[in-house]
């Protein structure tokens, strides 16, 4: 099942199972169904539970939060993270604080789905991931599933557990394929997954960068280097313990993340390890992240902006004190060719 | 026509609210027991009391920073409010909310927000839930005359009207946003007339006439119950005391004492009380003062939240 299909499936399963669940957002009932992730839901569940909204992200989120206070379990779909930034007031000032501010007597529940764009000139306002921004806020759960299995399991966890959950979905993961169980199962928040076991270097990734890191790990294996790849799966709560256990073993850490470095999740992990055990590193950790500037548009600039598989492999070689790769690593799949 | 019984209920509601607010003003700095920014409702009583009298217990209100009036008028627990203002464990938010974040779910008082217009979409969302679940309930969205300047307010009106949701928007127009007059913030278009642009009825009522507030709200609430959609009501009212805190602020110069006195002469409580024997009004006053005394004793004796609640 594709990532997009697993998301669709999770929502459909939960809507069949739980009358409280409904879904809305710009384009949700469209024929294309938000890149396939909402296709057919309106036909199955009707337009009272599956509907479009006016273009008003803050209002929409506030309305869904208000509905959740009456026992509903809404899903809000956003075709890009960037558009959702208009709703930060309802997310940060309201949803994240509600339970604490009212001493647990009321809690707001919503699953906010956010899609990150990349490539085909989408540029500075259609490609932001905003991991750090969301992960900074107490009271939020921030999921960044890298696989179809996790995407489905995390949607189910969000809808069953309640509370405000932000799920960051990378557009480039939408065609990833994996066997996904039928029916209901959960993937817990705050539990990283050791995607590849290894002993030489710990490579920490999230979201789309997990797929890229896997490719880098394969290249390195060809050079006799054993990478331990950790897929963070959620950015809040953050599973520092799994990373710690791995670095305790390897002593070497590379973090690859589709976001800017300052105040980042990757920076937080390095800080947490340094506080816990300053002698844990055999060499300085390295972050492979975006240049400190908005995402560019023109194709050659995009290529220069995003970390390549070689960049990831080179960072691992660097922390091991080995020479970097001589040549670029060829992409396995054809590049994304738009339009959106 | 408003029955004598209803008039009695409205008078008692307003009088009780006035006495609560005036007591809070009196004690606020006496021993500095109330360490929370407090936006008093004195002068505006007819709004919340008139609106809430037109509601059923299962209907909801989503208040804003000037929250005491809505909380009390909808039936929020007085002891829990006093304890909350003093930051006590027995408070309605166990000391995590304060004056701007009151809540009493059992009375239909949803959590209030101090972000302008922050709870307006929550009321619309409550109405959406009522519609999806087929419940015969109505949500009230109160907002000040500045809150209606926020984008989310307009987003909420658009949604509510589009989906014909059972919600009533109440704009409490007390002319000021802190110390800035309406004329310096908005073009001179009557606020209630803007509702028409969203395809919903808009009306204005006299915030010193609790019967007018009640009657117009009931009309709007009935329309919502008939599933005909939302309405908008602008209530002309006046905040007597300073924007935040217990004092009068005529000395600041952004408004004149004369302006204030013109509103105070038309005090909504005085107007209605004149229809009742003075002794009867006095007996209500005594009853409420005693209730407030007891609530304050309760709050003072209550424990503070334990520090261990703050986890690292
Ligand atoms: C989004 C936001 N902006 C600014 C403020 C600061 N603020 C608090 S109360 C207030 C005035 C509000 O006026 P109005 O809505 O008319 O309500 P009133 O205080 O008159 O009852 C302002 C500007 C705020 N709380 N939230
Ligand atoms: Mg005002």
Image (cartoon, grey):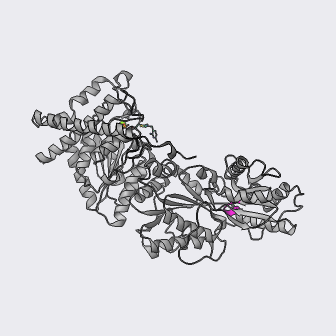
For the residue pair A63 and A228, the one nearer the viewer reads as A228
Name of the residue lying farthest toward the left: B277
Q: Is residue A274 left or right of residue B41?
A: right
Residue A106: percent from left, percent from top: 42, 54
Q: From this viewpoint, is residue B93 visible?
A: yes
Vertical comparison of A185 with B213: above or below = below
Q: Residue at x 47, y 59 (%)?
A: A109
Asked if residue A208 is among those painted magenta in the image, a careful observer would answer: yes
Residue A298: where, in percent of width, then height?
Answer: 72, 56
| Image: B253 above or below B153 | above
Range covered by the magenta-colored residues? A205-209
Quadrant in the picture for residue B287:
top left
Image vertical order of residue B185 relative to residue A237, above or below: above
The verdict on residue B295 being magenta is: no
Work out whether residue A113 or residue B93 is closer to the camera in this orientation and state it.
B93
Q: Nearer the viewer, residue B175 or B3?
A: B3
Question: Where's residue B111, x and y in %?
Answer: 39, 49
Quadrant observed for ligand 2 in the rendered image:
top left
């Amino acid at each position: 099942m594709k990532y997009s299909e697993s998301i669709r499936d999770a929502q459909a399963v939960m809507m069949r199972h739980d009358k409280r669940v409904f879904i809305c957002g710009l384009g949700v009932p469209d024929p294309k169904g938000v890149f396939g992730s909402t296709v057919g839901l309106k036909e199955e569940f009707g337009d009272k539970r599956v509907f479009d909204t006016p273009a008003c992200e803050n209002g929409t989120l506030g309305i869904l939060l208000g509905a959740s206070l009456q026992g509903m379990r809404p899903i809000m779909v956003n075709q890009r993270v960037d558009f959702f930034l208009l709703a930060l007031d309802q997310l940060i000032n309201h949803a994240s604080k509600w339970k604490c501010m009212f001493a647990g007597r009321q809690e707001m529940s919503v699953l906010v789905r956010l899609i990150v764009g990349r490539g085909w000139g989408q540029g500075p306002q259609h490609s932001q991931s905003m991991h750090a921004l969301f992960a900074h806020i107490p009271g939020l759960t921030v999921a960044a599933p890298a696989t179809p299995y996790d995407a489905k399991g995390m949607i189910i966890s969000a809808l069953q557990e309640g509370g405000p959950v932000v799920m960051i979905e990378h557009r480039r993961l939408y065609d990833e394929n994996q066997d996904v169980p039928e029916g209901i199962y959960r993937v817990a928040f705050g539990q990283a997954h050791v995607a590849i076991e290894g002993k030489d270097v710990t490579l920490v990734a999230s979201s789309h960068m997990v797929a890229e890191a896997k490719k880098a790990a394969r290249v390195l294996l060809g050079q006799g280097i054993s990478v331990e790849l950790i897929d963070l799966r959620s950015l809040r709560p953050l599973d520092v313990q799994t990373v710690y256990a791995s670095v305790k073993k390897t002593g070497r850490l590379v973090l690859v993340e589709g976001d800017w470095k300052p105040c980042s999740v990757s920076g937080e992990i390095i800080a947490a390890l340094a506080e816990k055990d300053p002698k844990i590193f055999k060499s300085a950790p390295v972050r492979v992240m975006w240049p400190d500037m908005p995402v560019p548009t023109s194709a050659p600039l995009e290529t220069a902006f995003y970390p390549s598989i070689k960049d990831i492999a080179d960072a691992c070689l660097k922390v091991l004190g080995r020479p970097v790769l001589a040549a670029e690593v060829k992409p396995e799949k054809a590049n994304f060719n738009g339009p959106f | 026509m408003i029955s004598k019984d209803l008039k009695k209920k409205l008078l008692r509601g307003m009088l009780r609210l006035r006495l609560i607010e005036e007591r809070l003003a009196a004690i606020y700095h006496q021993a500095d027991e109330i360490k929370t920014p407090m936006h008093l409702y004195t002068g505006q009583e007819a709004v919340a009391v008139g609106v809430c009298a037109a509601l059923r217990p299962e209907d909801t209100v989503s208040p804003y920073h000037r929250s005491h009036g809505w909380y009390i008028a909808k039936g929020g627990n007085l002891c829990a409010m006093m304890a909350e203002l003093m930051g006590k464990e027995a408070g309605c938010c166990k000391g995590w909310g304060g004056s701007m974040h009151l809540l009493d779910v059992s009375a239909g008082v949803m959590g209030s927000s101090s972000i302008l217009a922050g709870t307006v979409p929550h009321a619309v969302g409550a109405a959406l839930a009522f519609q999806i679940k087929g419940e015969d309930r109505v949500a009230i969205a109160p907002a000040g005359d500045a809150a209606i300047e926020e984008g989310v307010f307009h987003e909420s009106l658009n949604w509510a009207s589009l989906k014909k949701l059972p919600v009533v928007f109440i704009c409490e127009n007390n002319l000021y946003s802190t110390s800035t007059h309406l004329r310096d913030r908005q073009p001179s278009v009557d606020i209630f007339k803007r509702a028409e642009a969203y395809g919903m009825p808009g009306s204005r009522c006299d915030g010193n006439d609790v019967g007018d507030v009640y009657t117009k709200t009931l009309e709007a609430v009935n329309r919502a119950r008939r599933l005909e959609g939302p309405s908008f009501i602008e209530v002309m009212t006046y905040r007597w005391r300073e924007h935040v805190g217990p004092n009068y602020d005529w000395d600041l110069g952004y408004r004149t004492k004369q302006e204030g006195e013109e509103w105070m002469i038309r005090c909504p409580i005085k107007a209605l009380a004149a229809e009742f024997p003075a002794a009867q009004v006095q007996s209500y006053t005594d009853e409420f003062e005693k209730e407030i005394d007891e609530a304050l004793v309760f709050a003072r004796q209550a424990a503070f939240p334990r520090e261990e609640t703050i986890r690292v």
